[in-house]
Amino acid sequence: MPFLPLPPPPDIPPGKIIFERAESVWHTQTLPTYIEFTTFIASVSPDPVRVAVRTSDGKAYVETIPLRPDEKPIAYPGVHLEGPDYSPLGICVSMGYCTGVLGSDPFGEQVPTQPESMKTIAKARVFANPYEVVSTQYMDFDGSPVYDLKLAAPQDPERYRMREIVIDAATYHVWKMMYAEPKYPNRLLTYGFGPVEDIWYLRQACHSVTTNLSGLAVPACTPDVAMMWDYAFPKQIPDYYFDRNLYIRQSQIPSVKR
């Protein structure tokens, strides 16, 4: 069972503090310049895809990996993946199908303290948190103590759709983010994170439904799930892989090495 309730420690922080600490950890992580991984979305394609992400802008090169030897790979260069904070958290397997969520920051608005045109040595940010923590549960998540926070966004629930977040009780890394989907009121779009070598990164995206296990309501993924595996961190990938027009001009150049 992935979730089990635990007796809360006597010094458990308030939900608002837990949320703010996770926000701080989220924003201070540094990602490699390029991240590659393989994923599979059963509802979209019978073939797995290889994704190469340029983390500076979230653009990606996606190429199918045909399972049949008589089929050729299909390339999708310059796909812009938009997830929380416009980070590489969405998965695109075609120019028209992506999973992702709305909002420029998963934790709320980011407001620069000074105009962008002003030259500063260091720019501070003020974070206006649109979320309220409705409840906090101390739990075991696959052997790791976590805080499971239920959220609401009373001022603008259509824009701020995160409804649940699972946070590591020791490191304050995010294990899961779950978002409401207006078209599917009984489902949540769930992002699963975890350690990938030296970084904390996306490992799964799925539609989930609430399932009662031993009286505990927990999210369970439906078959519409994308798992990520076989990560790599290339030192360099040519820029034309992230620009459709440039890629067409360079179409005779070999694909990204897997």
Image (tube, helix red, strand yellow):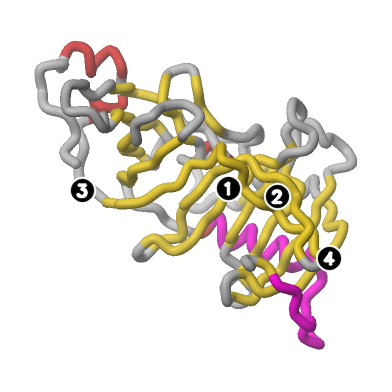
Judged from this view, the residue extending furthest toward the bottom is: 10
Pick whichever of labels 1 and 2 is earlier in the sequence: 2
In screen coordinates, is 10 left or right of 92? right
The spot of residue 86 in percent (x, y) is 53, 36
Pick whichever of labels 4 and 3 is earlier in the sequence: 4
Q: For numbered disc 1, what is the local secondary structure?
A: strand
Q: Which residues are drawn in magenta?
A: 4-27
Rounded to the nearest angstrom, the CA distance separating label 1 from label 4 is 24 Å
- The image shows residue 22, relative to residue 255, as above or below, that is below
Rounded to the nearest angstrom, the CA distance separating label 4 from label 3 is 48 Å
Pick whichever of labels 4 and 2 is earlier in the sequence: 2
Label 3 packing within 10 angstroms: few (<14), some (14-19), many (20+): few
Which residue has dot 3 on it? 235
Q: What amino acid does circle 4 point to? A: Gly
The spot of residue 254 in percent (x, y) is 11, 27
Pick whichever of labels 1 and 4 is earlier in the sequence: 1
Residue shown at the point (30%, 17%) measured from the top left: 244
The spot of residue 83 in percent (x, y) is 55, 37
- The image shows residue 109, relative to residue 164, as above or below, that is above
- Does the magenta-highlighted stretch encompass residue 7? yes
Q: In this rendering, which labeled residue sits more in front, label 1 or label 3?
A: 1
Kindly identify which numbered label has been placed on residue 127.
Answer: 2
Which residue has dot 4 on it? 215
In screen coordinates, is 25 left or right of 103? left
The spot of residue 66 in percent (x, y) is 26, 29
Which residue has dot 1 on it? 191
Residue shown at the point (66%, 74%) measured from the top left: 140
